[in-house]
Amino acid sequence: MKSILLIGMGRFGRYTAKKLSEFGHDVMAVDKKEKRINKIMDQITSVRIGNAANIEFLSTLGIRNFDICIVCIGDAFLESLEITSYLKELGAAQVISRATSAAQEKFLLRNGADAVVFPERQMANWTAIRYSSDHIENYIAVSDGYSIYEVCVPREWDGKRIDAIDVRRKYGFSILGIRNGKMNMNPSHDTILRKEETMLVLGKDDELQRYFRMQR
C-alpha cells in the first residue's frame, strides 16, 4: 500500500482518487473548492480544502510522508507548475503532473515533475486504436513502440495449436494469455485456439495493427 497525495479534484482527479482507493492505497485529496471535495470525501482516506499553490498551506500536509504526489490540475497550468515546484521544494519523493501539451511537459519536468501524464492524449490514442478494427478489444502501451493488445482470435487460427501457428516467427508477436470467460495467463505451446476467444498479444504497434486491421 502506498500513501498518495492528489491535488485537484476535477473529473480526472476524482477518477484517479477513486481507483487508487479501490486498489487499497492511502489517498489524501486536496482542492480549494469544497464542492469538489464533497464529491469524493466518502470514497477515500482523507481530504483537505485549501489552495495548494500556497506553499504555506502545502507545507502543512506533510509532503515528505507521501510516496507519490500527483498534480491533477488541467485547466490552470501556471498553478499546476507552481504546485509541482513547491512539492519538490518541500521534499516530495515522486511528483507526477498532468499536462495538455508538449510545451507544458517540458516546463513541468524542468520544475520538479518526475513524470508527466497526458490523460486526453492517452485516451485519444486508446480510442483510435481500439476502434480502428473490429478485432482489437483493448490495448496497453508498454514502451518504445511496443504494446499489449487484446484481440479476437482470427478465424484462420480457429482449432489450431499455438505452436502450429508459429506466431512469433511468422508475425513477430507473442501470445501472453487467452480469454474464454476467464483469463488463462499461462497458455502452453499445445493450447488450441478458438475463434470465440480473445488473446493478449505483445508486439510492435505497427505490426500488431497491420495484422489485426486486415482481419474480417
Image: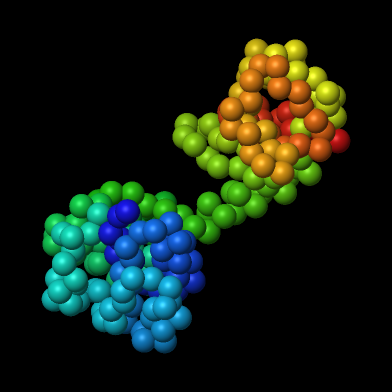
**29 shown above or below 132:** below
Which residue reaches farthest bottom? 35
Q: Position of residue 30 (x, y in %)?
A: 31, 74
Task: Please say whether residue 7 is visible from this viewpoint.
Answer: no
User: Could you tell whether 99 is left or right of 78 in the image?
Assistant: right
Count of numbered labels shown in the rendering? 0
Residue at point 53%, 59% (across, down): 120
**100 shown above or below 58:** above
In this picture the colour scheme is: rainbow
Residue at point 31%, 69% (across, down): 28
Which residue occupies the foreground of this view, 27 or 124?
Answer: 27
Residue 134: quadrant of the picture: top right
Q: Position of residue 206 (x, y in %)?
A: 63, 30
Q: Position of residue 178 (x, y in %)?
A: 67, 33
Q: Position of residue 204 (x, y in %)?
A: 58, 28
**96 shown above or below 210:** below
Residue at point 80%, 20% (across, down): 160
Residue 38: quadrant of the picture: bottom left
User: Could you tell whether 51 is left or right of 64 in the image?
Assistant: right
Which residue occupies the foreground of this view, 83 or 69?
Answer: 69
Task: Please say whether residue 67 is visible from this viewpoint.
Answer: yes
Residue at point 66%, 16% (across, down): 189
User: Could you tell whether 86 is left or right of 190 in the image?
Assistant: left
